Image (cartoon, coloured by chain):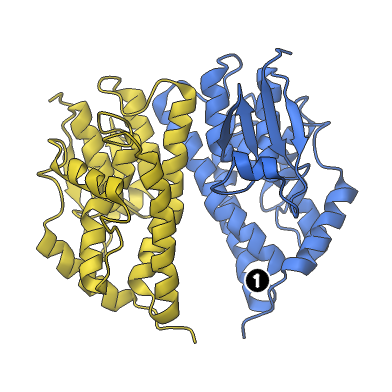
Chain colours: A blue, B yellow
Amino acid sequence: MAKENLKVLGFWCSPFYLRVLWALKIKGIEFEFIEEDIPNKSPLLLELNPVHKKVPVLVHNGKPIAESVIILQYIEDTWKNNPILPSDPHQKAMAHFWAKFADEKLVNSIFASFIRQGKEKEEAVAAVGEHLKFFEEELKSKKFFSGDDIGFLDLCLGWTVSFISVLDEINGLKMADEERFPLFSAWIENFSNSPIVKDTLPPRDRLLSKLRYMEEAFRIPPTA
Amino acid sequence: MAKENLKVLGFWCSPFYLRVLWALKIKGIEFEFIEEDIPNKSPLLLELNPVHKKVPVLVHNGKPIAESVIILQYIEDTWKNNPILPSDPHQKAMAHFWAKFADEKLVNSIFASFIRQGKEKEEAVAAVGEHLKFFEEELKSKKFFSGDDIGFLDLCLGWTVSFISVLDEINGLKMADEERFPLFSAWIENFSNSPIVKDTLPPRDRLLSKLRYMEEAFRIPPTA
């Protein structure tokens, strides 16, 4: 691995940190991991990301960059080996389009399915299904969203391979049902078992206890 | 101007369409403008942007792209003349960072300042001020956010030069106060009067009557 003056402030199960970790592994770039204690934000985090005060933050040669999708694009622009985005502008735009959709729509529906109750929970679970349909469609005749190899959109959706099954256990649901979403289910297997990813996923028991704790802390009672 | 097989579905006062129009003017690219009637979405819009059903959509050689920031990056990747983004990866990341902040935070606070009432309106107006502070800071010793010439972040914030003063008139406010935000106020002047922009801004009277109509349609009464 190439040595760089590179630090990443992250959190072991942050969906947004994990994609940065995987992108740097694909590029073969070593970095210093600085673990943040999310409930007690460090002075370093507040200094490096004063606008959002969130992980991940990548610090390259002393210059900080926040927002995971912007960090991924920075990594791609800085280290040209093992590209994670297509060189064709339209294909690149499509990868960004679906990553934005995932971060705006799927993140919100999954979070709502987790913290809402009653009718709102049912609506959120239905929305997760509607959103996953688009990704099922995108996987037609492909192993990964990017084709034969893991790329940008795979990295952006990568957190779902750990989170959906743990949330299903907490909620007593099966959101990424194999019969309804055979291609997405196969993708979960392929992504989880890929050499870049397999030893980096959050330990299931630890994630389960973290998310159970969060579910109690953030739960929103039904509105009616 | 270069002739291309290029169409843009837009709406005369859409903040997100306007940035695409300006980017194509900077590149000197001709396109066919297809005006959408937003309350009555056309079958063409639903076909070209089935996910979000929103303008703008850029259609280049028959291939559609939605989401204005992704369209801007596509334009930059496709036509290399008159760059709107820096070639330095960190500076490029910063332009994207502030554009994302503008679209997520400033758009929301300005929209809330417009449709909310009472205490929520006051809070939204305060949030607009907090968000504009960041942009005031970004303009230190610069004419445009990108430096001497209009670039990516200028385009993304360009809608504010028409909208803020019209909303101020409707709300009886002065959100981009010249004393509080001298650099941002100067930027509004510089951007509005630049050759690329000056004949393209929505006519003030037409925008005023459109936004008055929207304010009545979307108004949310105070919650307490």
Seen as rendered, the residue at the extreme right is A205
Rendered view: B55 above or below B205:
above
Q: Residue at x 65, y 31 (%)?
A: A143
Give x and y (percent) for residue B18.
Answer: 24, 46
Rendered view: A121 above or below A53:
below
The kind of residue on which mark 1 rests is Glu
Rendered view: A174 above or below A199:
below
* Viewer-closest of A158 and B157: B157
Q: Which residue is mark 1?
A: A122
* Viewer-closest of A52 and A133: A52
How would you rate the neighbour count of disc 1 (Cα within 10 Å): few for under 14, some for 14-19, many for 20 or more?
Answer: some
Q: Residue at x 21, y 42 (%)?
A: B191
Give x and y (percent) for residue A187.
Answer: 69, 38
Horizontal side of A173 relative to B201 (left or right) equals right
Give x and y (percent) for residue A177.
Answer: 72, 54
* Viewer-closest of A121 and A2: A2
Instruction: Give the quarter of the figure containing the C terminus of chain A.
Output: bottom right
